[in-house]
Amino acid sequence: MPGPRKLDPSSSPRALLGAELRHRREAAGLSQTDLGAPLFVSGSFIGQLESGVRRMQMDQAVKFDELLGADGFFVRNCRALKKSKYPEHFAEAAEAEARATEIKEYAPQLIPGLLQTEAYARAVFEAGRPTATDSVIDDLVAARLERAQILADPTVPMLWVVLDESVLSRKVGGPKVMAAALRHIAALARRRRVIVQVLPFSAGAHAALEGPLKLMTFEDAPPLAYLQGLGTGQLQDDPAAVRQRELAYDLLAANALSPAASLALIESVAEDYDHEAEQL
């Protein structure tokens, strides 16, 4: 098993906190489990903080300062983590996503953020925030497109997405926007940059009827599952809970169309949208 990744403390406040937490814990002769016990968190959670996967919360920073005699170091630097371009319920998941080596995602209603085009993302945000100013929408779209830059690397993270067939049918932004959005996904799949499957309506009931699911694997930390609802989100690191979500994803993939059949369907639906747009 590879050892812990050496974080560059200058790269981000989260990396600084993680590196310092690991240094002070080891200097105190504590295991990750030992340090986690007074905070009622697992040793794996401490490991995720140290590797920069998880975001340190202020109440945790206060406790670390107390337990490790850090003289307010963690509280002072934790304040730098409070600013985020993402909604509060998603900020920690977005930070973890950027460090993942493998991402698996089931999308029941919308194209996942990492695969959205600018026009599609704008339509999503405008529908969800009908009274927001143009500048607010612009910032949200820019942040979403910035997230997608992790796909600029040719191999990491490995992204595997299962799209419910309803994602293809939901006309977000109109036929022209949908045609371009689906062609974008098809292009990524044809370049073998992403694995995409479509879960057809004919599959009937399935293992993730309750909502979207994202699984993230890391080089130097335990895996995470992220569950999202309307304006809410939850990261799960409990091994049993994560395994349950992994099984759900495996069942979804097993019931979905093959990648080749899925690509053919996505491109066919994109053509249908193109024809519809021409008639408008």
Image: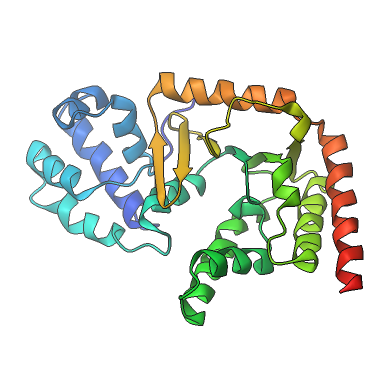
x 63%, y 51%: residue: 110
Residue 52 seen by the camera? yes
Measured as percent of width and height from the top left, residue 149 is found at 61, 59
In which quadrant will I find the C terminus? Answer: bottom right
Report which quarter residue 120 is drawn in: bottom right
Nearest the viewer among 192 and 154 is 192
Residue 134 rendering spot, x and y as whole percentages: 51, 81
- Which residue shows up at 51% across the image and 49% down it? 98
The total number of labels drawn is 0
Which residue occupies the foreground of this view, 240 or 10?
240
**Going by the picture, which residue comes out furthest to the bottom?**
134
> In the rendered image of this protein, does residue 185 appear above or below residue 259?
below
Colouring scheme, one of rainbow, by chain, secondary structure, one colour? rainbow
Which of the pair 233/185 is nearer the observer? 233
Q: In this view, does 27 lie to the left or right of 226?
A: left
Using the rendered image of the protein, determine whether residue 53 is visible from the camera's viewpoint. Answer: no
Q: In this view, does 51 lie above or below 15?
A: above
Q: Where is residue 217 in the image (x, y as percent from the top left)?
A: 52, 33
Q: Position of residue 167 (x, y in %)?
A: 70, 48
What residue is drawn where x is 76% and y is 61%? Answer: 178
Q: Compared to 220, does 69 lie above or below?
A: below
- Would you identify the image quadrant in which residue 7 lies? top left
Residue 233 found in image quarter: top left
Residue closest to the eye, 192 or 235: 235
